[in-house]
């Protein structure tokens, strides 16, 4: 009988911990490597400017999330290195700049990157509420950002002048040069300035919620109003052209802002952005990196986009949209974890080569394990993609894992609620699932309580309840199956028939046949290359590409000096 691998988020967190603590450079206090080329000979990782900008922030969050899930001290020293990097290089207007490393060029601060920095400071203060330096930097950053915006106050139109009733803020540019400020002859070249700069919306709202920082709230409102109005970035249905990661991160901020302030227009607009991106995505979590920029046949998914959809789904659940549990669950247990590198068997290393000032060749086959792809198709990780393994995604993916892990089971007011089928133990209950092999969720109470288990559409109509192996009726409460007054030590189960379903699905502008067992995709046709996804048969040998001995470099990388083997 075929057995399939189960969704085990702790296993994914352990793999992520490996990457986050080994794909770093000890010579520079564990500075991360963004660029990784595991598919050329020899495989290598190489520094670039973003390592000391976005990455020290997002990797702090990713490592903190993975360690919190695992409850481990492993990685503590590397996380402390990330904090030290994060606390360096602060300059004018309260902005964080990057260090002048040998591979750095014009020293500048990017407003898109400040979203990551503020988000990391929020997490740092959650980890360490008494960290005065982190609080000073966060408060200074928010005030510095507020001082740099243009506030549009009056509309001067052909029929007269009209005052703006609401705050309306935008930045003059997407970069700020150290010692030179705004130089309008310089830009990042990314375009989409409103949405890239606006990515800081959610970290601003989180900052206000946790600390009561009214400047953060004011800045968040002003940025939101500009994005939803005169920026003309979104159409009336909240469709857009461009960067999905930034847009969905903004959507999360809008939903949270609307929920916390009671201003429903923000919530509705955030939900509409989410719905639009969902319409471009697969049911199992493949999300395009861009909307309407390339032909869809050329799109890949950046794991950051999957994290944003999971995060936004969580925000919408908190706002009352319980249908979003399906997105959070299916996206996490399928494409999110499939985008992770679980074996370095395809990597050709040459450990005889000496590392250079900005490049490393050592043990890339071991260090690459746990990374996440920035260039996956629905059925494969394409090694031809520049970001087959992406430094940005390893910072965000563990955060998504933690979001799902934390929401899977909750306890309050004498009730254990199991929202997602995942094996997990808490002080209140131990949950064991059978998926994708058996249609079963079992909850063993560790205290006297009520037990509620969320019902999902893929369970079908034949769901039966059991307590200690004997069938027992449950009552329905919204989307929950509720068992009242369960004594400590008793085991409650939901069981239902589970059969493989073959579903035709249109994704990335082609038809795939997706084989489901409950909430899990166990295979997808046609099968992909180079790294084939959804090889979920338990114990089967995974099919990875063989290491190539052809020496070469991928476009976008600067070749290292030629070195002879000793």
Image (tube, rainbow, N blue to C red):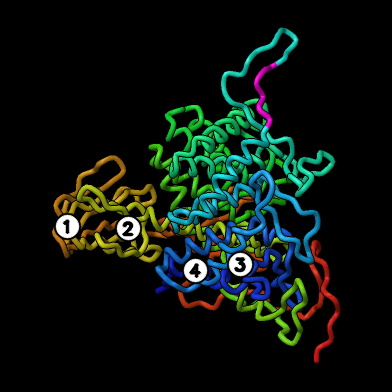
The mark found on residue 471 in the picture is 1
User: Of the residues tagged 1 and 2, which is closer to the observer?
Assistant: 1
**Is any atom of residue 406 visible in this view?**
yes
Q: Which residue is mark 2?
A: 497
Disc 2 from disc 4: Cα separation = 20 Å
**In the foreground, 198 or 91:** 91
Quadrant where the C terminus sits is bottom right
Label 4: state its secondary structure: loop
Compared with 154, 223 (above or below) is below
Disc 2 from disc 3: Cα separation = 29 Å
Q: Which residue is mark 3?
A: 532
Q: Residue 301: x, y in percent?
A: 63, 54
Q: Earlier in the sequence, mark 1 or mark 2?
A: 1
User: Of the residues tagged 2 and 3, which is closer to the observer?
Assistant: 3
Dots 1, 2 in contact, CB < 8 A: no
Q: Earlier in the sequence, mark 2 or mark 4?
A: 2
Q: Earlier in the sequence, mark 4 or mark 1?
A: 1
Label 3: state its secondary structure: strand
Disc 1 from disc 2: Cα separation = 15 Å
Disc 4 from disc 1: Cα separation = 32 Å
**Is any atom of residue 339 visible in this view?**
no
Residue at x 55% of width, y 61% of height: 60
Magenta: main secondary structure equals strand
Q: Which residue is mark 4?
A: 536
User: Of the residues tagged 2 and 4, which is closer to the observer?
Assistant: 4
Disc 1 from disc 3: Cα separation = 42 Å
The part of the chain drawn in magenta is: 150-155
Q: Residue 157: x, y in percent?
A: 73, 13
Compared with 244, 351 (above or below) is below
Q: Is residue 151 magenta?
A: yes
């Amino acid at each position: 009988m075929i057995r399939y691998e189960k969704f085990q988020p702790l296993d994914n967190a352990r793999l992520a911990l490996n990457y986050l603590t080994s794909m770093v450079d000890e010579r520079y206090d564990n500075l991360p490597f963004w660029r990784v080329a595991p598919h050329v000979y020899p495989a290598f990782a190489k520094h670039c400017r973003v390592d000391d900008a976005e990455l020290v922030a997002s990797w702090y969050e990713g490592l903190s999330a993975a360690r919190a899930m695992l409850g481990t001290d492993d990685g503590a020293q590397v996380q402390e290195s990330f904090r030290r990097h994060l606390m360096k290089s602060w300059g004018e207007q309260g902005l964080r700049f990057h260090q002048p490393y040998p591979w750095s060029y014009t020293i500048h601060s990017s407003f898109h990157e400040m979203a990551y920095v503020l988000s990391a400071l929020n997490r740092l203060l959650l980890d360490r509420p008494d960290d005065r330096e982190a609080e000073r930097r966060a408060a200074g950053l928010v005030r510095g950002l507020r001082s740099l915006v243009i506030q549009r106050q009056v509309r001067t139109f052909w029929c007269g002048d009209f005052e703006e009733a609401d705050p309306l803020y935008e930045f003059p540019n997407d970069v700020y040069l150290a010692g030179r400020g705004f130089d309008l002859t310089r830009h990042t070249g990314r375009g989409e300035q409103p949405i890239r700069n606006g990515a800081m919306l959610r970290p601003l709202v989180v900052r206000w919620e946790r600390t009561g920082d009214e400047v953060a709230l004011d800045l968040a409102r002003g940025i939101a109003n500009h994005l939803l109005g005169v920026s003309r970035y979104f159409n009336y249905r909240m469709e857009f052209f461009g960067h999905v990661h930034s847009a969905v991160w903004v959507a999360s901020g809008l939903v949270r802002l609307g929920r916390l302030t009671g201003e429903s227009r923000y919530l509705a607009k955030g939900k509409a952005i989410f719905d639009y991106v969902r319409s471009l995505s697969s049911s199992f979590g493949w999300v395009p990196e861009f909307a309407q920029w390339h032909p869809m046949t050329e799109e890949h998914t950046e794991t950051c986009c999957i994290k944003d959809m999971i995060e936004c789904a969580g925000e919408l659940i908190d706002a009352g949209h319980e249908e979003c549990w399906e997105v959070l669950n299916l996206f996490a247990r399928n494409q999110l974890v499939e985008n992770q590198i679980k074996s370095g068997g395809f990597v050709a290393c040459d450990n005889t080569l000496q590392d250079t000032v900005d490049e490393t060749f050592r043990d890339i086959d071991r260090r690459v394990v746990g990374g996440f792809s920035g260039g996956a198709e629905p059925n494969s990780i394409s090694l031809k993609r520049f970001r087959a393994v992406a430094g940005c995604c390893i910072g965000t993916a563990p955060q998504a894992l933690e979001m799902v892990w934390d929401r899977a089971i909750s306890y309050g007011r004498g009730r254990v609620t199991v929202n997602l089928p995942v094996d997990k133990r808490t002080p209140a209950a131990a949950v064991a699932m059978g998926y994708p092999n058996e249609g079963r969720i079992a909850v063993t109470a560790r205290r006297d309580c009520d037990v509620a288990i969320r019902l999902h559409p893929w369970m079908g109509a034949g769901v039966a309840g059991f307590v200690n192996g004997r069938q027992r009726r449950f009552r329905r409460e919204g989307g929950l199956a509720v068992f009242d007054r369960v004594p400590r030590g008793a085991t409650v189960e939901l069981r239902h028939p589970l059969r493989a379903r073959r579903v035709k699905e249109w994704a990335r502008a082609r038809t795939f046949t997706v084989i489901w067992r409950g909430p899990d995709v166990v295979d997808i046709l046609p099968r992909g290359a180079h790294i084939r996804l959804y090889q979920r048969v338990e114990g089967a040998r995974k099919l990875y590409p063989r290491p190539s001995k052809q020496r070469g470099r991928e476009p976008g990388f600067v070749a290292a000096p030629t070195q002879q083997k000793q």
